[in-house]
Image (cartoon, helix red, strand yellow):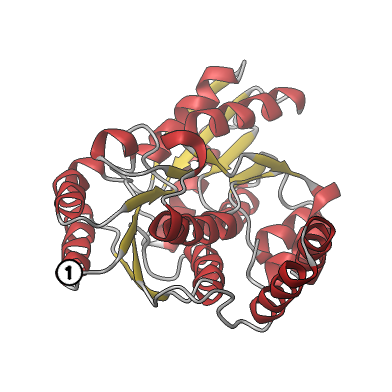
Amino acid sequence: MSAVLAAVLGATLAGCSATGGKRAEERAAKAAQGRAAVDTPRWTFAMVTHSGDGDTFWDIVQSGAKQAAAKDNIKFLYAHDVEGNKQAQSVQAMIDQKVDGLIVTLAKPDAMKDVVAKAKKAGIPVITVNSGSDKSKEFGALTHIGQDEVIAGEAVGEQLNERGKKKAVCVLHEQGNVGHEQRCDGVKKSFKGEVQNLYVEGTNMPGVQSSIEAKLQSDKDIDAVVTLGAPFAPTAVKAAEQAGSKAEVDTFDLNAKVAEALQSGKLGFAVDQDPYLQGYEAVDLLWLYRYNRDMLGGGRPVLTGPQIVTKDDAKTLAEYAKRGTR
């Protein structure tokens, strides 16, 4: 953060008057201390996601959102529910509170369509994040921030090809999540080998391990296991060990445990979509829209990934993962 602030400050001072440079320096100093760097009204922004309990990915998203909120003088609210209807109810509750901006995920778009329309009718600007890039504009959101899930899946398939893999299993831990289906579809699109989908109950981690283990025991030709979330990668590694399988485990998303596993060689690679950036940019873009009607991308998705992370990258990223920003 200090390096970024220094770079921004240096560029600002070079192109501004003495007064402008001084003000920029003051804003940068406040931001570095976690204080508001602006004097705009204290708006309230709410984020409502499809996260389940204990998902470290969404902890990182929140970390970015809270950092931007502190900088932009924003009161930040957060709610989540893995069930689409309950997520929609939480969004409705935020509308009833008359928040000044909404950030939502569209993992279950059918459940969210009507309530997003209600937010728009109420004059509340909406940005979608992480899931639902293909529905965001249709539903009336200003923009979408995240990765294109099909493109991310294709990146995985290409990486598996480079590693000489022939048969992969794609582990879907949340049924009904269209983004997860798109990831596996992307893998199938680019992978030259065979891909099988394995549906598991993500809220039951012992069950997840048992399902993967049984699949590997029944099919010794599987040489790659792809999980769709960082918390499931270590479980897949255990399953492979218990099954006596030499299948490589790879995963979408990054956290501290995944970074460590990449360093040790227990995981082959990870696909990082930068959840910190998703949270940060969602709040910051809402602030820019409220303040100045700015919007990046002209309404098109703002991509934060995918980035393939291997053992070579893990050491540096592990430091960021431990502080909760990668």
Q: Is residue 14 left or right of residue 287?
A: right
Q: In the rendering, at what x and y percent does residue 203 appear?
A: 36, 61
For the C terminus, the image quarter is bottom right
**Residue under the image location 36 percent in, 73 percent down:** 43
Q: Nearer the viewer, residue 89 or 286?
A: 286
Decide: is 67 above or below 298: below
Q: Evaluate whether residue 245 shows in this view.
A: no
Label 1 element class = helix
Q: In the rendering, at what x and y percent does residue 67 appear?
A: 56, 72
For the N terminus, the image quarter is bottom right
**Residue under the image location 32 percent in, 59 percent down:** 102
Decide: is 220 above or below 15: above
**Residue under the image location 84 percent in, 62 percent down:** 10
Find residue 87 and report its image quarter.
bottom left
Q: Is residue 218 left or right of residue 19?
A: left
Q: Which residue is mark 1?
A: 93
Q: Hey, which residue is sitting farthest top in the picture? A: 192
Q: Is residue 34 left or right of residue 54?
A: right
Q: In the rendered structure, which amino acid carries the disc numbered 1? A: Ala
Q: Nearer the viewer, residue 61 or 232?
A: 61
Q: In the rendering, at what x and y percent does residue 46 appear?
A: 33, 67
Q: In the rendering, at what x and y percent does residue 169 appear?
A: 52, 34
Q: Nearer the viewer, residue 202 or 324?
A: 324
Decide: is 12 above or below 106: below
Decide: is 207 above or below 23: above
